[in-house]
Image: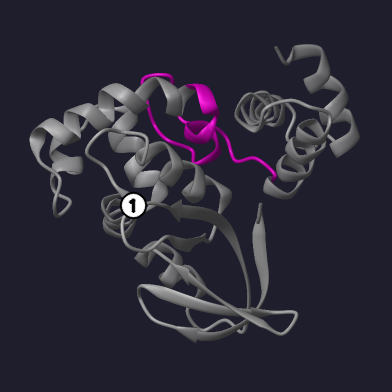
Amino acid sequence: MIEYIKGELTDLTPAVAVVEAAGVGYALNISLTTYSAIQGRREVKLFVHESLVTGGRDDSFTLFGFQSRQERELYRMLITVSGVGANTARMMLSSMTPAELCNAIANGDERMIKSVKGIGLKTAQRVIVDLKDKIMASGIADELHVGTQRGDAQMVNTAVKDEAVGALTMLGFSPAPAAKVVTTILNEQPDMAVEMVVKEALKRIK
């Protein structure tokens, strides 16, 4: 399983990025959000979602690239919703930033989601119903500083958070609950060192 690809950006269009790593050029389908984030850069790091489609005449293996873990996690949540396929999910992340999309889902903004090309009212409602609780439970809303009735989350140290979540994942905890606990800890104590965050998370994580 590919977690991310880091290397030289050799070709870029609004839909596809080609990243060369260790002599291999990887073509990754991207959103406009990722396109905007990496445009003009020589070296990039893209988080990967692998899609294998079997059956029919030909099997296909496609890589999707995202400029952040949060965008990838939102994409993975979106494609679990009935009626939202890979292209629709990418369209949603091209029409809104991850923070805007997360905010729309968390606050039940059907109009905002329905404004995306190819999304009707029923699909917009299904996205909200299926993902609202998942988004709040996963910690993405806190990481993206989404405003809800609970109030805005503080800024967290992304480098410390990623390292702490990575350590907890290696210890056998699922990434989503780990990210939620780590984000909460860093909101409470923004300057806490990685090892202390991990120790505190081990006391709180369920």
| Label 1 element class | helix
Q: Quadrant of residue 109?
A: top left
Residue drawn at (18%, 35%) of the image:
124
Residue found farthest to the bottom: 10
Left or right of 31? Residue 159 is right
Residue 34, quarter of the rendered image: bottom left
Residue 193 visible in the picture: no
Q: Identify residue for label 1.
A: 86
Which residue does the image show at 17% across and 35% down from the upper left?
A: 123
Residue 48 visible in the picture: yes
Q: Is residue 98 magenta?
A: no
- Residue at image x 57%, y 57%? 48
Q: Which residues are magenta?
A: 137-157
Q: Residues within 10 Å of mark 1 (few under 14, many from 20)?
A: some
In x, y percent, where is residue 11? 49, 86
| Residue at the extreme left | 121
Q: Quadrant of residue 174?
A: top right
Left or right? Give the position of 115 relative to 183: left
Which quadrant is home to the C terminus?
Answer: top right
Amino acid type at mark 1: Ala
Q: Is residue 167 above or below residue 200?
A: below
Judge whether residue 148 is colored magenta.
Answer: yes
